[in-house]
Image (cartoon, grey):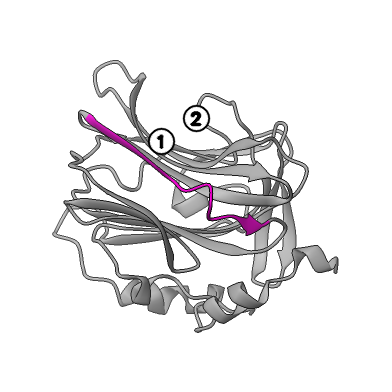
Amino acid sequence: MDDRHQISPVSRRFLLAACGLRALPRLLSAQPAAGRGGPPASEVWTIDRLEGIGGYPTKVLGRPRLISTPLGKAVEFNGVEDALFVENHPLAGAELFTWEVVFRPDSGGAQEQRFFHLQERDPETGADTGRRFLFETRLSGGNWCLDAFVHSGSASKTLIDRSRMHPLDRWYHAAMVYDGKEFRSYVNGELQAASEVRFAPQRAGHTSIGVRINKVDYFKGAIRLARMSRRALPPSEFLKLKSP
């Protein structure tokens, strides 16, 4: 396998404890139960297929492909036309949240890429509103930094620190956390940026993986899985993965 797609020493130290595909049922069972009839307290989407992501209807755009990686199967996107659209917004209604993604940003893509997007819809018209969650990358000189963005209710906030750059072509864990007062972003469990803000919960909607919901700013790289939790997790409780 090409060395550029191996896990870096820093990433390997972070992605340690057992939580491979076989361990996902145990992970899910360990989450707090949701109220009767309410949404799950936590959802894990394993991006190892092209249909039924998270158990929801999924539409394929372009030709994303399944690949084998040190972490198990993942979906690879070409940065030009590949994406997945999922008919669910897993953090709709969440007052607090932690959103985690395990992904590999690759060389050769555009300078600005949107690799995961949760989008609110207007319940009366079905049209997308301006309210959304976005994970993005900013590329420069063979490196990238994380851009975490949320617009919810009347508040919006971008978290980005261009001094915190990371090498491309390696696997990473990214997270955004909101505890009701502060919005924070992390890469491999290390804080990237933080800001005080007050977000209102979003309404139901849908999700795009590999591109922004309006089909611009495609992602070049691979995505293994995501977890969306309805509470603010400390880094000690973030997903930790090892090779199967």
Residues at circles 1 and 2 in contact by the CB criterion of under 8 Å? yes
Mark 2 falls on what kind of element?
Answer: loop
- Residue at 72 percent of width and 67 percent of height: 69
Tell me residue 68's x, y (percent).
74, 65
Q: Is residue 46 above or below residue 72?
A: above
Residue closest to the eye, 212 or 199: 199
Disc number for residue 109: none
Is residue 221 on the magenta stretch?
A: no
| Place of residue 118 in the rendered image (x, y in percent of width and height, measured from the top left) | 40, 39
Q: What number is the disc on residue 213?
A: 2
Q: Mark 2 belongs to which amino acid? A: Ile
Residue marked by disc 1: 206
Res. 140 visible in picture: yes
User: Whole-percent x and y of residue 115?
Assistant: 56, 43
Which residue shows up at 72% across the image and 54% down it?
A: 66
Q: Residue furthest left?
A: 36
Magenta residues (range): 155-167
Q: Position of residue 18 (x, y in %)?
A: 51, 83
